[in-house]
Image (cartoon, grey):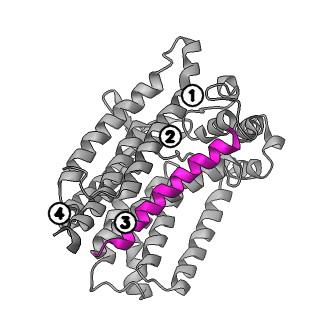
């Protein structure tokens, strides 16, 4: 059977997140019908991404995940990711939207190469850190080389600009090398360097400084940089403890910009209240927990590192998105996994989940008790 041996907790949490994501996406986007559009337009688009993701899952669940450790396969994915990130940075090729160049268009389909690059980095590090000859406890011959490709991906994504996605790649890379046994002193040195670079980047342009200031007091910048965060906080305030009811929130109609994408968690807060927010976050925590459990139980070091990286990426992306929406971080464009509209994001997430399931099934089916 296709799902024989797959971790049940992982599967159940995945299905619930996908179902809840579609439901909340409809509640956040049906207002488009007021402008002559379809109330189900975003849901249909998301379902197309889910269909692609389902095909990807069927393929990835049928193969041995260790094939991903093959040099040709991994290098092909690395080169494709770098090439696509370079293409999206070229004016006239990369699609500009809301001041950022993050998309490539192939016919009627647009996609973000950064979504693929995130998992290409994880695969690269899983291969590198699983080599017996690679000593991550060494600074210049271990830890620094491990950050070369993540650093390249970080810089290319920063050009878009997309600091949140670029930062999530470095955070997950740090988590993976930490799990692999890197020294805290070395990680601290690299972390301080990264923070210095991020501070310089944030303060190097006027609009970035303005965005940083608006994050500190969004209502003081209500007419410009602080508008979206202010409306998000108002949505949470309106939702209260139990919310206004699914689809009954008002902020999405003409106040909160793009409620179906990066700020969809504000719709959860207004419609379902604090109780709904806690329930959704509990689902994410369960998914990450079961993913990390797969990593701990896996006896193959490559599989263990790969599962840890995928789980960490989904967890980090969730934390960063929620932190932005509730005002704990400056406003950046990072989608909420399984919830935010985006066919590319959901299909690649489903593929990554299939790899987690593959690893868990491989360990379960090869255990002595199943012989």
The answer to whether residue 289 is seen in the rendering is: yes
Q: Position of residue 181 (x, y in %)?
A: 43, 83
- For residue 222, above or below residue 177: above
User: Which residues fall within the magenta stretch?
Assistant: 273-299
Q: Main secondary structure of the magenta part?
A: helix
Q: Position of residue 262 (x, y in %)?
A: 57, 41
Task: Tell which circle, 2 or 4, labels the residue nearer the N-terminal end.
Answer: 4
Task: Tell which circle, 3 or 4, labels the residue nearer the N-terminal end.
Answer: 4
Task: Give the residue pinned by disc 4.
Answer: 72
Task: Give the residue pinned by disc 1.
Answer: 27
Q: Is residue 281 one of those drawn in magenta?
A: yes
The residue at 48%/16% (across/down) is 38
- Mark 4–mark 1 distance (CA, rounded to whole Å): 44 Å
Task: Give the residue pinned by disc 2.
Answer: 339
Q: Are marks 2 and 1 in contact (CB under 8 Å)?
A: no
Task: Give the residue pinned by disc 3.
Answer: 294
Instruction: Classify residue 125 by image quadrant.
Output: bottom left
Q: Nearer the viewer, mark 2 or mark 4?
A: 2
């Amino acid at each position: 059977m296709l799902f024989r041996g797959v971790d049940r907790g992982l599967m159940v949490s995945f299905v619930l997140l996908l179902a809840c994501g579609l439901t909340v996406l409809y509640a956040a986007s049906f207002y488009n019908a007021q402008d002559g559009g379809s109330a189900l337009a975003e849901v249909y688009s998301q379902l197309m991404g889910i269909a692609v993701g389902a095909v990807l899952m069927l393929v990835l669940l049928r193969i041995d995940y260790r094939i991903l450790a093959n040099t040709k396969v991994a290098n092909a994915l690395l080169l494709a990711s770098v090439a696509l990130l370079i293409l999206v940075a070229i004016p006239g090729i990369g699609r500009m939207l809301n001041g950022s160049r993050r998309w490539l268009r192939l016919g009627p389909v647009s996609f973000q190469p950064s979504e693929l690059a995130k998992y290409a980095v994880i695969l690269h590090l899983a291969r590198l850190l699983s080599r017996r000859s690679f000593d991550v406890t060494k600074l210049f011959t271990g830890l620094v080389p491990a950050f070369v490709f993540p650093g390249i991906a970080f810089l290319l994504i920063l050009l878009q600009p997309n600091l949140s996605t670029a930062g999530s790649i470095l955070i997950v890379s740090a988590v993976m090398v930490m799990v692999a046994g890197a020294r805290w002193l070395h990680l601290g040195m690299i972390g301080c360097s990264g923070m210095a670079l991020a501070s310089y980047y944030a303060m190097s342009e006027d609009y970035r400084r303005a965005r940083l200031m608006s994050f500190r007091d969004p209502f003081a910048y209500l007419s410009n940089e602080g508008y979206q965060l202010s409306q998000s906080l108002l949505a949470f305030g309106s939702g209260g403890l139990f919310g206004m009811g699914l689809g009954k929130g008002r902020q999405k109609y003409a106040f909160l910009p793009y409620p179906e994408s990066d700020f969809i968690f504000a719709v959860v807060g207004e419609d379902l209240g604090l109780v709904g927010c806690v329930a959704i976050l509990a689902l994410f925590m369960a998914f990450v927990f079961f993913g990390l459990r797969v990593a701990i139980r896996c006896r193959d070091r490559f599989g263990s590192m790969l599962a840890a990286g995928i789980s960490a990426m989904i967890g980090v992306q969730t934390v960063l998105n929620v932190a932005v929406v509730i005002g704990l971080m400056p406003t950046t464009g990072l989608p909420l996994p399984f919830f935010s509209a985006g066919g590319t994001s959901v299909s690649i997430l489903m593929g990554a989940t299939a790899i987690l399931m593959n690893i868990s099934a491989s360990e379960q089916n090869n255990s002595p008790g199943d012989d």
